[in-house]
Amino acid sequence: MRSLLSHLDRRTFDLIARRDWPGAQRVLPRLTRSANHGLLWLGLAAGAAALGGRPVRRAALRGVASLAVASATVNTLGKGSVRRQRPVLDTVPVIRQLQRQPVTSSFPSGHAASAVAFATGVAFENKWWGLALAPVAASVAFSRVYTGVHYPGDVLAGAALGAGAAFAVRGFAPTRAQLAPPARPRAEAPALPAGRGLVVVANRGSGQRGGPVPDRAAEVHGVLPEAEVTVCGGEDGEPLDKALEDAAERALALGGALGVVGGDGTVNAAAAVAARHGLPLAVLPGGTLNHFAYDLGIETYAEAARAVESGEAVAVDVARFRAGPHLEGHQFLNTFSIGAYPELVRIRERWAGRIGAWPAGILAAWEVLRTAEPLSLRINGERRAVWLLFAGNCQYRGLGFAPVRRHDLADGVLDVRVVHGGRLARTRLLVAALMGTPSSSPVLGEARLSRLQISEIPEDTQLAFDGEVAPATRELTLDKQNEALRVYRLLPE
């Protein structure tokens, strides 16, 4: 059986070598060289990450990770376990042949494995992008036979390994579709075809780090042409709080919903108004990070528009922090923190407009790690020296002090994580992070609570919530309002 397969493999190779493929000799040798060491795919990934948004960057990262696993598998297990001679080039026209012939084992094809792994990995994030890459990946795989460096069987085996690598990566790091936030609890919200009845407030300044200011009204009307849009912020714009109140009253009169375009701070303000007026909220991600929208499963205006038009919505929790258990306070949809992080946000915002968001974040982190000192606080009655106290609205995935995303936005808990102060606390925490064991470090404490009391907070202490920074009062109470807000989002089929 093995000899029969080998005979068919060689015969197919000879048939391909002897056949004339119009136009292929100008394209396929160049294409196969461009894919050496994965450079073609790495270049596509870098370009997509630089020019695209978060979904594109995520697809590019998954493609590169799949490529890396495939390449490692081929070069260790594949070529190391099967020693096969490269094809004899007697039947391959010289004009097709590569100037530098590979000398490693012919089985399996590393180029085919990388091509299929990258395209399959991208397809797991977005099937249309994967389909667009499929002809390129297939051409790279075929070029290895066309130029005479592999038998067809080598290419098929490499392709199978590449697809397997992409599946392995997906098993280790599930896609957004696999880990979509649960739809429970569903909430009633009006279906608004073309956005009729939706009153949107767009914050002109959200997500801007220099460069031209986008036309927010045109962006909204591009997906919801009948929505009413008010653009606020900027030097000559209406204040955000007044624009939101006016929009809520208009939405109530129309029997519709309140919409918001902006980052997490703007969405927080809109959520407070929507909850107070009993209106559903449509979130169109227009900020720098958009944590709430992404955890909700809304990454584009188009996704938000489909949810609004179909009337699909869920109820989500809202967390609060107040100066006392019976006093008015502020709410947060994502995170609250006190200690080093508010200072990091303050420094980052001071430099972001000059050098960009990411360089400013690196500069701020370095400055905070160099200068921050622990705070002495009383947490639920116990005196603690704290370098950082973090509280998330609902439980976050991610170990230790690096929470990533939430799976459930209505679980009724505060995700509390504390980095304790003390001797060599930062050094011990850094060592734990480098060893991959932050959750087991004695420097870190974690709890899932419905209520948290913080008292004896030193004067001039800053706190941060949903990307905003504010002065802390002497005493703070954190608690939850379960399922207090209705938000549009697409529900799983």
Image (cartoon, helix red, strand yellow):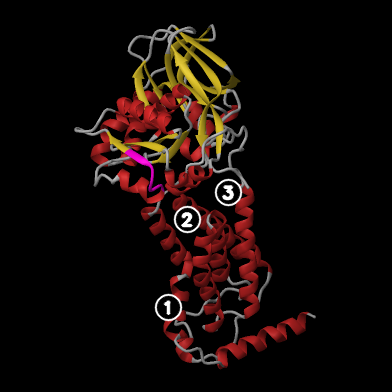
Tell me the distance, in whole angstroms, between the alpha carbons under discs 2 and 3: 13 Å
In the image, residue 383 lies at what x, y percent? 50, 8
Q: Is residue 131 above or below residue 228?
A: below
Q: Quadrant of the N terminus?
A: bottom right
Label placed on residue 60:
2
Amino acid type, mark 2: Ala
Question: At 60% from the left edge and 43% from the top edge, which residue is drawn?
Answer: 179
Q: Is residue 226 magenta?
A: yes
Tell me the distance, in whole angstroms, between the alpha carbons under discs 2 and 1: 23 Å
Q: Is residue 371 above or below residue 397?
A: above
Label placed on residue 244:
none
Tell me the distance, in whole angstroms, between the alpha carbons under discs 3 and 1: 33 Å
Q: Earlier in the sequence, mark 2 or mark 3?
A: 2
Amino acid type, mark 3: Thr
Please name the residue that numbered disc 1 is placed on: 30
Please name the residue that numbered disc 3 is placed on: 175
Amino acid type, mark 1: Arg
Whether label 2 touches label 1, CB < 8 Å: no
Q: Is residue 213 visible?
A: yes
Span colored in magenta? 224-229
Whether label 2 touches label 3, CB < 8 Å: no
Q: Helix or strand or loop: what does disc 2 sit on?
A: helix
In the image, residue 84 lies at what x, y percent? 65, 77
Q: Is residue 404 visible?
A: no
- Of badges 3 and 1, the one in the foreground is 3
Question: At 51% from the left edge and 26% from the top edge, which residue is drawn?
Answer: 392
Q: Residue furthest left?
A: 236
Name the foreground residue: 286 vs 229. Answer: 229
In the image, residue 474 lies at what x, y percent? 40, 7
Q: Main secondary structure of the magenta part?
A: loop
